[in-house]
Image (cartoon, helix red, strand yellow):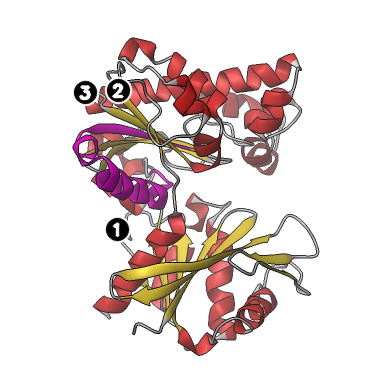
Amino acid sequence: MNDKILLTFNAGSSTLKIGLFRIAVSGPMRETRGLVDFRHEPLTLRIDGPEPLQVALRAKPDEDLSDTVSEIFEALAKHLDIGRIAAVGHRVVHGGDRFGGPVALDNRTIDAIDALTQLAPLHQPQALRLIRAIHKVAPDMLQTASFDTAFHRTNADVVRRFAIPRAFHDQGVKRYGFHGLSYKYIAGELARRAPAVAGGKVVVAHLGSGASLCAMEDGKSRDTSMGFSTLDGIPMATRCGALDPGVLLHLLGAGGQTLAEVENILYHRSGLLGISGISADSRELLRSSEAAAREAIDLFTFRTAGEIARLAATLEGLDAVVFTAGVGENQPRIRARVCTRLGWLGVELDDMANAGNATLISSPASRVSVFVIATDEEQIIADETYCVIGAA
């Protein structure tokens, strides 16, 4: 098995991250990574590594991705023996209450994943398109699914419930939580780097274009900012975050918006982009002198700090905060603004460490440790795929 390779597909709403992992004695070891961005045509496959590769794809980003998958395999075949691929692992956003861990994919499990599409309409279809395309191109290829919701299955019932009639809860209208693969990786990394802290009460802030936070105790999820959908919680690049349900009633009623128009507003026209009217990219907003740009950053950091405080209440204490994902890992000014609002909790940053994106950015006097740890969802997908192969 040591000469075999695992391929991981991490499908977002507009991009596809690809990972290649060599199976070693200790488990999957990353060989290289790639990216396809569906927002720009012609589609281009970029592969990192000692010899970076950029391949223009002829395929169009249509509903059937089999041509795209075929070209990806063709490009990879120039650098490795495709016959060495033991399995392809996928990130699937929503596992509902059906999936509590990784699974091998067959017609039954694919249909069950498809049935959950209504709960994650922005992300679930992308993963399903890739799964079906690979099955069409390589029908004998073993495929597995890893679920973002699975990590939060340890949340208590009181955390998962909405204050709505019980019948809706029983039908699946409850808080699920997302970004679970990222949180699982951070839990493992924190245990490796700071085991004494990892066993305590930790809030992890996954701040990227999609953003959420997770309260962990002894490395297990106890609460999270996202709930029934990937819209909930703090404001994001283009998503609204938590919203008074009365706003939806107004938009659909007196506001005269259709359901499709409201969905577009909440997923694509809100968040940093909606507040600023300038950009969904926090880096651009931080450079801007426009008042609306400052307001967008202020609201984002205000809500993020407030959510950390709420999650600390769930944990009944706070030992550490971890920043991760694109914004969390790379933007000291965002971290500083969030932590300044948490001074009453005993959070104090080391300004030089924060400016340098160091791993530990809290000062020695801080009662709460603050870390910056890069996440790696593809590594978790590879690890879980390897476990499914072993079980099989």
Residue 275 seen in the current view = yes
**As rendered, which of 282 and 309 lies closer to the eye?**
282
**As rendered, which of 361 and 268 lies closer to the eye?**
361
User: What residue is shown with label 2?
Assistant: 368
- Residue at (44%, 19%) from the top-left corner? 339
Q: Quadrant of the N terminus?
A: bottom left
Give the answer, above or below, for where 378 lies relative to 346.
below
Q: CA distance from mark 1 to mark 3?
A: 26 Å
Please give left or right for residue 113 compared with residue 331 in the image: left
Give the answer, above or below, for where 3 lies relative to 90.
below
On residue 316, the disc is 3
Characterize the magenta stretch by its predominant secondary structure: helix
Across and down, in percent, residue 374 comes to: 45, 45
Please give left or right for residue 343 compared with residue 154 in the image: right
* Kind of residue at badge 2: Val
- The answer to which of marks 2 and 3 sits earlier in the sequence is 3
Circle 3 SS class? loop
Instruction: Give the magenta-colored segment's residue range.
Output: 177-206
Circle 1 SS class? loop
Density class for disc 3 (Cα within 10 Å; few <14, some 14-19, many ≥20) is few
* Kind of residue at badge 3: Glu
